[in-house]
């Protein structure tokens, strides 16, 4: 009834499915953004294809692409083992409540175990209760101690301060 396949962003049909799902998510209440134009989508494919730590997986339901999970593999400097960050979990509205989100998250957890990862982490909007239910089913929860997710939006037009250290300072240190 459903199956997981790895996304290959060098394949045109996978690119189309990927951007369709991503734009579906972006335009959803939980996404809250502007969908990606064709040129931005092509830029994204190129950028992701150059990220060796990026993987995405589609879930097919009755032969149709119904959802996707995107991940990035990273490293825990404290535990000296790899970890996987789940970046996006997307299930099209018409396919929700069929266990597909569970299937995607479960797949990545099994992948992490097989790759000797120390953990899988993710971020979730505090008002996305449906997603939190799925994650709790897999024993995800707030970190201990509690961590906050911070960001600094970078504006391409702002002036950047130049480092006061010179190349000579760095080489002679």
Image (cartoon, rainbow, N blue to C red):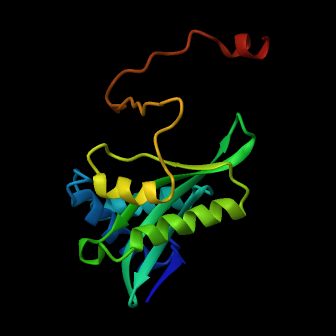
Q: Position of residue 2 (x, y in %)?
A: 45, 84
Q: Is residue 132 left or right of residue 5?
A: left
Residue 148: quadrant of the picture: top left
Say which residue appears at 36% left-offset and 57% top-offset: 133
> Quick check: 169 left or right of 126?
right
x and y percentages locating residue 50 in the rendered image: 57, 57
Which quarter of the image is occupied by the N terminus?
bottom left
Q: Nearer the viewer, residue 31 or 94?
A: 94
> What residue is rendered at 61% in x and 55% in y?
53
Quarter where residue 107 is shown? bottom right
Decide: is 13 above or below 39. below
Depicted 120 relative to depicted 110: above or below: above
Q: Nearer the viewer, residue 153 or 127?
A: 127
Answer with left or right where residue 59 lies relative to residue 171.
left
Q: Residue at x 51, y 53 (%)?
A: 139
Residue 77 screen position, x and y as percent: 70, 35
Q: Which residue is drawn at the image coordinates 40% and 68% (left, top)?
A: 101
- Residue sitting farthest toward the right: 172
Total marks in image:
0
Where is residue 64 drawn, in percent x and y?
36, 86
Which quadrant does the C terminus fall into? top right
């Amino acid at each position: 009834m459903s199956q997981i396949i790895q996304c290959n962003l060098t394949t045109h049909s996978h690119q189309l499915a990927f951007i369709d799902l991503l734009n579906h998510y972006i335009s959803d209440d939980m996404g809250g953004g502007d969908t990606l134009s064709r040129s931005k989508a092509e830029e994204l494919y190129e950028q992701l294809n150059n990220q060796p730590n990026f993987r995405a997986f589609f879930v097919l339901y009755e032969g149709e692409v119904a959802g996707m999970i995107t991940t990035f593999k990273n490293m825990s400097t404290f535990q000296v083992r790899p970890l996987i960050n789940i970046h996006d979990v997307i299930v099209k509205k018409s396919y929700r409540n069929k266990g597909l989100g569970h299937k995607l998250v479960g797949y990545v957890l099994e992948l992490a175990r097989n790759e000797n990862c120390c953990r899988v982490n993710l971020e979730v909007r505090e008002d996305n209760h449906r997603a939190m239910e799925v994650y709790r089913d897999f024993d995800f929860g707030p970190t201990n101690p509690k961590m906050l997710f911070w960001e600094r939006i970078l504006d391409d037009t702002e002036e950047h301060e130049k480092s006061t250290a010179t190349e000579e300072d760095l080489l002679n240190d």
